[in-house]
Image (cartoon, grey):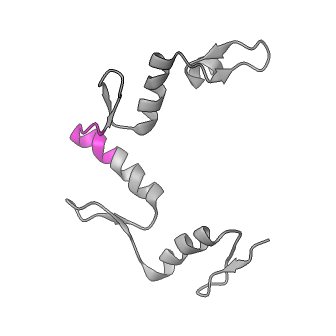
Amino acid sequence: ERPYNCTGCGKGFSCNYSLVTHRRIHTGKKPFAFIDSGKSFSQSTNFNRHHCHHCVHTGEKPYSCADCGQRFTRKASLTQHHHIHTGEKPYSCADCGKSFKHSSHLTQH
C-alpha cells in the first residue's frame, strides 16, 4: 500500500518521510549543506557520501575512537575498529559457527 502520493508527479510512497524526500526533486530544496563550500544536497545520504569523499582529499578524520583516540575518515571504519576493543566478532559462518571481526574474513573462510 502506498497512501502518500506526490502532487507533482503522482508517484506513491508507503511512508510520509519518503514522500517528503521525493518532493525535493520537484522543489529543488537542498537542506543538507556544507557551510565552507556551499555545496548542498537534497538527501542526507548524499551529503554524508560527499563528506566521506571530501575527507579523503583533505585528510580530515572527524570520527574518533573513545577508547584509544585513533581517528577515521568514515564512521563505518570507526565501527569496525571498535571491534578490536570489544572483542566482538559479529560475522558468523552459518555452516560451522566460527565468528570473525570483519565480513571479508568470513567471505574468505
Residue 5 placement: quadrant: bottom right
Give the image location of residue 64, x and y in percent: 32, 32
Q: Is residue 109 visible?
A: no
**Which corner quadrant holds the C terminus?**
top right
Residue 102 placement: quadrant: top right
Residue 56 placement: quadrant: top left
Task: State the count of labels.
Answer: 0
Q: Residue at x 62, y 82 (%)?
A: 6
Mostly what secondary structure, the magenta segment?
helix
Residue situated in front as seen by the camera: 108 or 100: 100
| Above/below status of 18 relative to 52 | below
Q: Is residue 5 visible?
A: yes
Q: Residue at x 80, y 71 (%)?
A: 1
Residue 61 is covered by the magenta coloring: yes
| Above/below status of 12 relative to 85 | below
Magenta residues span: 53-62
Give the image location of residue 54, x and y in percent: 29, 47
Give the image location of residue 30, x and y in percent: 39, 71
| Above/below status of 99 relative to 52 | above
Q: Residue at x 48, y 27 (%)?
A: 80
36 relative to 18 in the view: left or right: left
